[in-house]
Image (spheres, rainbow, N blue to C red):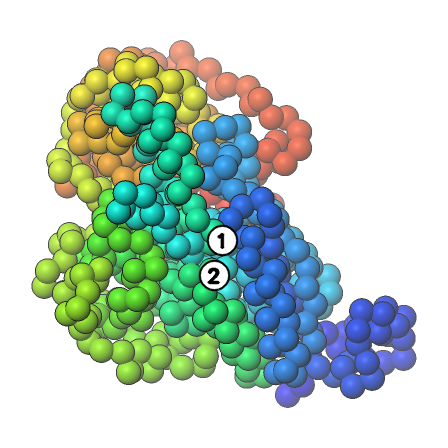
Amino acid sequence: MSDNLRSRTITQGSQRTPNRAMLRAVGFTDNDFTKPIVGLANGYSTITPCNIGINDLAKRAEAGLRTAGAMPQIFGTITVSDGISMGTEGMKYSLVSREVIADSIETACNAQSMDGILAIGGCDKNMPGAMIAIARINIPGIFVYGGTIKPGHYKGQDLTIVSAFEAVGEYSAGKIDNNELLAIERNACPGAGSCGGMFTANTMSSAFEAMGMSLPYSSTMAAEDAEKADNTEKSAFFLVNAIRHQILPSHILTRKAFENAIAVIMAVGGSTNAVLHLLAIANTIGVELTLDDFEVIRKRVPVLCDLKPSGRYVTTNLHQAGGIPQVMKMLLVNGFLHGDALTISGQTTAEVLQDIPDKPSIYQDVIRPWNEPVYAEGHLAILKGNLAPEGAVAKISGVKNPKITGPAKVFESEESCLDAILTGKIKAGDIIVVRYEGPKGGPGMREMLAPTSAIIGAGLGDSVGLITDGRFSGGTYGLVVGHVAPEAFVGGTIALVEEGDIITIDAKERLLELNVSKEELAQRLQSWTAPQSNYQRGVLGKYAKLVSSSSLGAVTDLDLF
């Protein structure tokens, strides 16, 4: 079978003389027109440290593809820095960028009839954006993670970007002075790479490794280490092999692969955003996956890794302790991983993990023994109730009391909520409600890292709940509930909450309840008026018009016709 199944459309025959003429101008020679053309989606950007090192990786991937017998074609994809846009209007573009990235990769690959795709990304939405595109076009593909940042250091403590966000809350509460705040700012991000805890970027890279769409150990490598560049070049060879054997994303991204990813996410204490992104990828590839599936796996799989934001260690520590392969092997031997799931190498998951020890090393405590987990059950709970009939996602790691009942403090935006926290208007026992921040209402489901970090910094993490139809950063922890669906903008119950209403968050019973009668809620709904969107044109206007509920992954191509 020819390796250039798609690209021969533009390289073969006399009618393609003009096409070949243009390809010669970008480096093709007579012997190259029968080689597979591989797209190299390069997420390089100086916008964020997450992506600043990716261009060097792209060059290594390009060299590897050529050596392996393919013709690489590099094109750029955008990125948005979640950390820099956090707490501003710019954050509304973060989740939107997932769709822009997916659309751009799909467009380039299909327009140019590419035979395979190697995507390199760093910041949070790069990963799901690339994987959605790979699933859409269903040509052999591999994802290469740009790598994690190394921890900053200050006063003997490892720092991450979340340390800076929490320092703002500590400063506002009078716990640290300006000199301390500035010192944390200067030391939190020491170089290139994505945010260092088990936040969203590292969660999604771990998920893709677990699914078999990235090479073993690649998801926890530091961006600045030589092994990351070596692994990138190695990924190129595996991709060309997949092209030759026509190992397609649809062969790898099966129901079993998604279940493996969810199990790993629970075991490492990953981000709530993984729920949203895996739902979106599953929808794209045609695998049936619902919020309830996450809850089923959560009840079975313990949290094995003691990682930030709620734990002690960062992702580079996990890498040194055995990385995702060690976690996967523990899940496999205990019956919580599908060993027969296919990987990009052509091997099964069990074959890939064959030489990994069944138990973690006794000389580390990042990965706990199976019978001594951090938590006996997973940390991402799916809550339902009259406040979230479709469901909501709670991250309950680091929470001393998984249940709270208290009066609602209602805010129509993240900014007004943050101001109330920083000025001491939120008290122990309150339940903060931040609404009109959902997929349509935001639009874009902004992440609430600034408010949740301010709560932690103020010492209220164990005594204040927060619910929102927006999202949370992977750096968030505490009794927080996001992705509340239906969202306020479409008339979900969260739109009907009034100041002082009593709300119950009960993670143990999976309950999110507004303690108001059905009759009263019906009256409130009758008098509720749908708001006018502030975004009528441009990318946010298009997104708000097309985006689905968060319970379906907030996708933009569902039921278009």
Q: Earlier in the sequence, mark 1 or mark 2?
A: 1
Residue 330: quadrant of the picture? bottom left
The disc placed on residue 192 is: 1
In the shown orientation, is residue 92 left or right of residue 356? right
Check disc 2 and give the amino acid type: Glu
Q: Secondary structure at mark 2?
A: loop
Where residue 360 sits in the image (x, y, percent)? Answer: 19, 70
Q: Is residue 325 above or below residue 79?
A: below
Q: Farthest residue in the bottom direction?
A: 1
Where residue 408 sits in the image (x, y, percent)? Answer: 26, 18
Residue at 63%, 26% (x, y): give it.
536
Q: CA distance from mark 1 to mark 2?
A: 7 Å
Q: Is residue 535 above or below residue 347?
A: above
Where residue 445 sits in the image (x, y, percent)? Answer: 45, 35
Q: Quadrant of the C terminus?
A: top right
Residue at 42%, 67% (x, y): give it.
218
- Does the image show residue 350? no
The disc placed on residue 26 is: none
Q: Is residue 106 above or below residue 412?
A: below
Query: Considering depth in this image, is 292 or 381 the residue closer to the camera?
Result: 381
Q: How many marks?
A: 2
Q: Is residue 150 above or below residue 117?
A: above
Where residue 348 sits in the image (x, y, percent)? Answer: 37, 79
In the shown orientation, is residue 31 left or right of residue 498? right
Residue at 54%, 53% (x, y): give it.
51
Q: Which residue is mark 2?
A: 224
Decide: marks 1, 2 in contact (CB < 8 A)?
yes
Q: Secondary structure at mark 1?
A: loop
